[in-house]
Image (tube, rainbow, N blue to C red):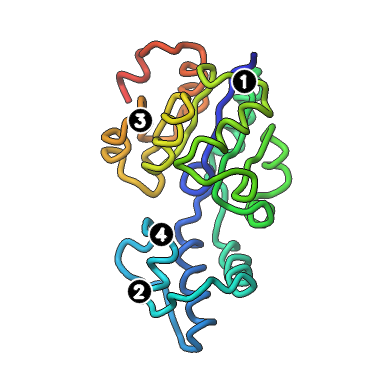
C-alpha cells in the first residue's frame, strides 16, 4: 500500500480568504440590489457558515446557484495558490508519496481556482459532490481508496476543526496548519496530532510524518 498525504484546499494550499469574503459580498450585492462590500459582512465571516453570513445580511432563502457561481468566478481572481504549494506537491510526489485533495468546493469551482499545472500534481481530487462533507470521513476514505492507501499510512493536512475531526473519524493522522482560517491553538485543542506553524519545510515535515507513525522530533517541536 502507498503512503499518502491528503490536503484541504482553502487556507492550506490556496490563499482564498479575500476571495471568499468577496464572493459573499458580491452575491449579497446581486441579490439585495444594493452596494455590499466586505466591510459590511458580519464579524468572523471568514469562519462562519455561509448560510449564517447571508442570513445576517437579510438573505435567508434558498441559495441562487447561478448568482453564487457568478460571484465565485469573479472573486476567484483574488485567490492564488500559496507560494509553497507547487514545490511541496512536487517534492512529495518525487519521494513516491501519493497526494490528494479533499475539499468542500465543487469540481467546477476547483477548476476555476487552480491552474492545470497544479491540478496535475494531485493524484486524486474529491469534491463536494463526491462524498458527504467534512467532518464526515467519507471524502478522505474515498480519496485513500482511489490512491490505494490505508488510513494508517496517510495524513490529512487541514486548517479547521472540521478537518481535524474528519481525519480522526477516518483514522488518518491529523495535521493542522497555522496559516489558514483557524488559530493553531484551536487546532491543537481539537486534537490535531501535529500543528505546523510555518510553511517552510512543509514537504520535509510531511515526509517524516508519513514514514513514522510514532511521535518524532519534528512533531515535538511543532
Q: Residue at (55%, 62%) from the top-left corner?
A: 78
Q: Earlier in the sequence, mark 4 or mark 1?
A: 4
Does 157 sit above or below residue 110? above
Q: Name the quadrant of the N terminus.
A: top right
Q: Determine the CA span between mark 1 and mark 2.
A: 43 Å
Q: Between label 1 and label 3, give the one nearer the viewer.
A: 1
* Label 1–label 3 contact, CB within 8 A: no
Q: Determine the CA span between mark 4 and mark 3.
A: 22 Å
Q: Earlier in the sequence, mark 4 or mark 3?
A: 4
Q: Which residue is mark 1?
A: 149
Q: Which residue is mark 3?
A: 192
Q: Which residue is mark 4?
A: 49
Q: Earlier in the sequence, mark 3 or mark 2?
A: 2
Q: Between label 4 and label 3, give the one nearer the viewer.
A: 4
- Left or right: 162 in relation to 43: right
Number of other residues with Cα within 10 Å of mark 1, as a class: few under 14, some 14 to 19, many 20 or more: some
Question: Residue 145 occupies which quadrant of the picture?
Answer: top right
Amino acid at each position: 500500500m502507498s503512503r499518502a498525504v491528503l490536503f484541504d484546499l482553502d487556507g492550506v494550499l490556496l490563499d482564498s480568504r479575500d476571495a471568499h469574503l468577496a464572493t459573499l459580498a458580491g452575491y449579497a450585492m446581486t441579490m439585495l440590489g444594493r452596494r455590499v462590500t466586505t466591510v459590511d459582512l458580519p464579524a468572523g465571516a471568514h469562519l462562519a457558515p455561509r448560510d449564517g453570513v447571508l442570513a445576517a445580511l437579510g438573505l435567508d432563502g434558498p441559495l441562487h446557484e447561478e448568482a453564487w457561481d457568478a460571484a465565485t468566478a469573479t472573486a476567484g481572481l483574488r485567490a492564488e495558490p500559496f507560494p509553497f504549494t507547487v514545490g511541496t506537491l512536487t517534492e512529495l510526489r518525487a519521494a513516491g508519496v501519493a497526494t490528494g485533495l479533499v475539499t468542500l468546493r465543487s469540481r467546477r469551482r476547483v477548476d476555476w481556482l487552480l491552474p492545470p499545472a497544479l491540478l496535475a500534481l494531485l493524484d486524486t481530487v474529491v469534491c463536494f459532490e463526491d462524498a458527504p462533507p467534512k467532518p464526515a470521513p467519507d471524502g478522505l476514505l474515498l480519496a485513500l481508496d482511489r490512491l490505494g492507501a490505508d488510513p494508517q499510512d496517510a495524513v490529512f493536512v487541514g486548517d479547521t476543526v472540521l478537518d481535524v475531526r474528519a481525519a480522526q473519524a477516518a483514522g488518518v493522522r491529523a495535521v493542522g496548519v497555522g496559516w489558514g482560517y483557524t488559530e493553531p491553538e484551536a487546532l491543537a485543542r481539537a486534537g490535531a496530532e501535529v500543528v505546523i506553524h510555518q510553511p517552510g519545510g512543509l514537504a520535509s515535515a510531511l515526509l517524516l510524518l508519513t514514514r513514522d507513525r510514532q511521535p518524532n522530533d519534528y512533531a515535538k517541536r511543532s
